[in-house]
Amino acid sequence: MENSVYKVVELIGTSPDSIEDAIGSAIQRAGLTLRNLQWFEVTQIRGRIDKGNVERYQVGMKVGFTHDREEQ
Amino acid sequence: MENSVYKVVELIGTSPDSIEDAIGSAIQRAGLTLRNLQWFEVTQIRGRIDKGNVERYQVGMKVGFTHDREEQ
Amino acid sequence: MENSVYKVVELIGTSPDSIEDAIGSAIQRAGLTLRNLQWFEVTQIRGRIDKGNVERYQVGMKVGFTHDREEQ
Amino acid sequence: MENSVYKVVELIGTSPDSIEDAIGSAIQRAGLTLRNLQWFEVTQIRGRIDKGNVERYQVGMKVGFTHDREEQ
Amino acid sequence: MENSVYKVVELIGTSPDSIEDAIGSAIQRAGLTLRNLQWFEVTQIRGRIDKGNVERYQVGMKVGFTHDREEQ
Amino acid sequence: MENSVYKVVELIGTSPDSIEDAIGSAIQRAGLTLRNLQWFEVTQIRGRIDKGNVERYQVGMKVGFTHDREEQ
Amino acid sequence: MENSVYKVVELIGTSPDSIEDAIGSAIQRAGLTLRNLQWFEVTQIRGRIDKGNVERYQVGMKVGFTHDREEQ
Amino acid sequence: MENSVYKVVELIGTSPDSIEDAIGSAIQRAGLTLRNLQWFEVTQIRGRIDKGNVERYQVGMKVGFTHDREEQ
Amino acid sequence: MENSVYKVVELIGTSPDSIEDAIGSAIQRAGLTLRNLQWFEVTQIRGRIDKGNVERYQVGMKVGFTHDREEQ
Amino acid sequence: MENSVYKVVELIGTSPDSIEDAIGSAIQRAGLTLRNLQWFEVTQIRGRIDKGNVERYQVGMKVGFTHDREEQ
Amino acid sequence: MENSVYKVVELIGTSPDSIEDAIGSAIQRAGLTLRNLQWFEVTQIRGRIDKGNVERYQVGMKVGFTHDREEQ
Amino acid sequence: MENSVYKVVELIGTSPDSIEDAIGSAIQRAGLTLRNLQWFEVTQIRGRIDKGNVERYQVGMKVGFTHDREEQ
């Protein structure tokens, strides 16, 4: 069985600053326990509002990585 | 009837600068007449093009707020 | 804050005659209380049947307008 | 212009008890300011979790009503 | 990196009794291994039929939780 | 041709009481003419409102059954 | 079991003339064998092109009717 | 009323061998009772797993045919 | 390689008069440069509003044609 | 402007034999006029039926390629 | 709590040969660490193109399994 | 035939820096061969990951332009 297999996990990154920063937060966090992260896809852009301004962006993402034996 | 009820309105914010700025414009405008804005969700990212560059981002959003008696 | 902001409302127009006529009914009705209607988008085309014929078209629409202070 | 026109608003009802109760909360609240509510459609069933149990159901709904002059 | 990150897992809860009970089963089961469960979203309501009656509700859900280091 | 084939029909069950009861009504009705009902999937949850309360739940469903020769 | 149950069938009506005429064709045809047709919902608007003009509109529809014992 | 009308039914074909074989099973089965089958569209590809291998493909399909008087 | 291949392009036709007329405009325009147009599918029905009436229908469509060597 | 840009075209490949063969037909045909094809994504699996068997698979696809100056 | 609970993971299987082979690769890989795999559902069929031919199929899938204590 | 007709093409812009920059790259590239670009709509936000950080944003877009005779 030499065909590559990938696994996809769903994360939500947050940031008070920007959509890109929220994406980066989730990817950096995922990188702590998952090796070989390869791509992401944004599934949702939401956020919290406080006193009439964006308090925090919440960006839903799917993140794909090579399915090595160590990760479940 | 003590269960909270929220209302959701649909807005389109615009900005020549960025997606985040377009989101902020809509939320600030909504805050002038609606109290207790709580969250938003982006439903669409579009824009106008002029002379081969982005002239204006148009970001469709749903914005949720506590359904007080004063707002319809 | 000079960036334009638009609001979108959802309506259902009806007509015994045609889809276009149902769209027109909703837009004319909305124009009685909302100024600056700018565009519409059809979201659903349904209808009632009576005695084996279309009795009434029901056309769901989103209608967008400039978000002036007077409208909520 | 004798064709009926309906308006649709989006609400989120909540309840600690059941989905039906969350639906009922939103409809009762809407009935305080909107006359002639006619139908609803569930768009989303979510909820908050606390200590491993459902704390509160949050049911997103579209609610349709006859578009009278008094309501916007 | 102080921005919160959440993880979302997909579960299917089942119950012979009700949709709410199926949701509760999945959340209670998830709580055995995942801490800090925060919200759920129903993605699908299905069921098995036996002898012309509902035998079992099967409710698909996404469940979100704070992405701590211990969980993958 | 020994591979199993299933057929799927679309029904709407109704009930003044609950979503589960509306599902049950449709399945019981379908069982009068279709044998071997096996599963259902909810496609839509709607309802009628009367005097500010839910009058009737209307639950759209797909129902699958073994495609025997007798059923069309 | 006094709760109403409805059945939904999927049809495609065609017409060289208009979308409304294609809808009408399907409903009239369905009325030959199904009693109590009550509503329709358009699911798709397609058509065939011949020599650079629309040759025929093909309108996909779901049609709902009271689920009497005689119809399957 | 000379405009053609088509009917669409939803089937699930199964096969232990391939997606194409599952499609073929459903079409051959449908052909036993429905004349003038004309086209199909795959709506879902699922399957059962047994001992770590695909046991059976389950392919959901819509199948269209000329709506003759004999078929309902 | 004798299997037919088709190409699909996306167009938006407009008309002040009707949805059908907007469809026809796009097909006639496409026919000036593309041979062998075969079918279309409506993807979106929108429009501009002026002074409370529909000013122009905008109908989004996919148009399919035989993929000859001359067309790209 | 050194950032890569890709273009995506929509094709329908056909084959009497298999889904994979229909995909291959479209890609080979596209390769005659487009250089640097890089990926595809299946958007639809349909087919024609003749005498109760699949006559031809029709597989809708999006095909992406590097946006060189020569291609439009 | 005797109600069964299932977990669903998202995988992408690949194969140079066929869609079925890509599905099989993902299921076999998942079976190395997850017991009681029960069903799969295809969510996406994509692929890489090299020199005008399909180089590799990439099939996105959801895979469901009994949620035992050992798996997370 | 004086009704305006627009054409829509699908592009993917990329950038290591931001979503807005990826959008801009695609629009500038398209402007080299297409005149009268008028609007865009984002259809997908993805990206590549390298060493635990976003390496490149990939933003799928539809871009609309006036359908002049010179463009295909």
Image (tube, coloured by chain):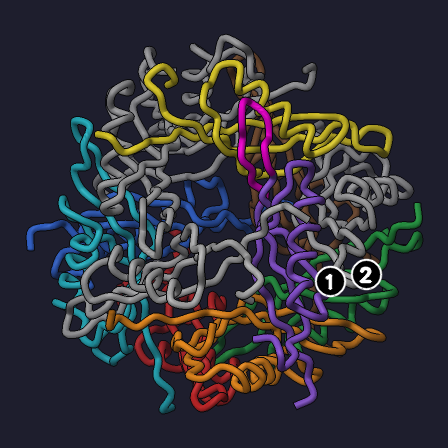
Chain colours: A red, B orange, C purple, E cyan, G yellow, J brown, K blue, L green
Q: Do tags 1 and 2 sit on the same chain? A: yes
Question: Which amino acid type is shown beneath numbered disc 2?
Answer: Phe
Question: Which amino acid type is shown beneath numbered disc 1?
Answer: Val
Which residue is label 1 attached to?
L63
> G46 or B35: which is nearer to us?
B35
Q: Is residue E5 above or below residue J64?
A: below
Which mark, residue L65?
2
A9 displayed left or right of A22: left
Give residue K59's position: percent from left, percent from top: 45, 49
- Rate crowding at label 2 as few (under 14), some (14 to 19) or many (20 or more) other CA atoms within 10 Å: many
Tag 1, which secondary structure?
A: strand
Decide whether residue C49 is among the magenta residues: yes
Q: Is residue G35 above or below residue K42?
A: above
In the rendered structure, the residue with mark 2 lies on which chain?
L
Q: Specify whether residue L51 is in view.
A: no
Q: Specify whether residue A12 is in view.
A: yes
Bounds of the magenta span? Answer: C45-56
> C12 or K21: which is nearer to us?
C12
Give residue G25's position: percent from left, percent from top: 64, 23
Q: Which residue is drawn at 46% across and 47% down?
A: K15
Please tell me whether the stretch drawn in magenta is mainly helix, strand or loop.
Answer: strand
Give residue B62's position: percent from left, percent from top: 50, 70
> CB under 8 Å between callouts 1 and 2?
yes
Q: Residue at x 21, y 57 (%)?
A: E23
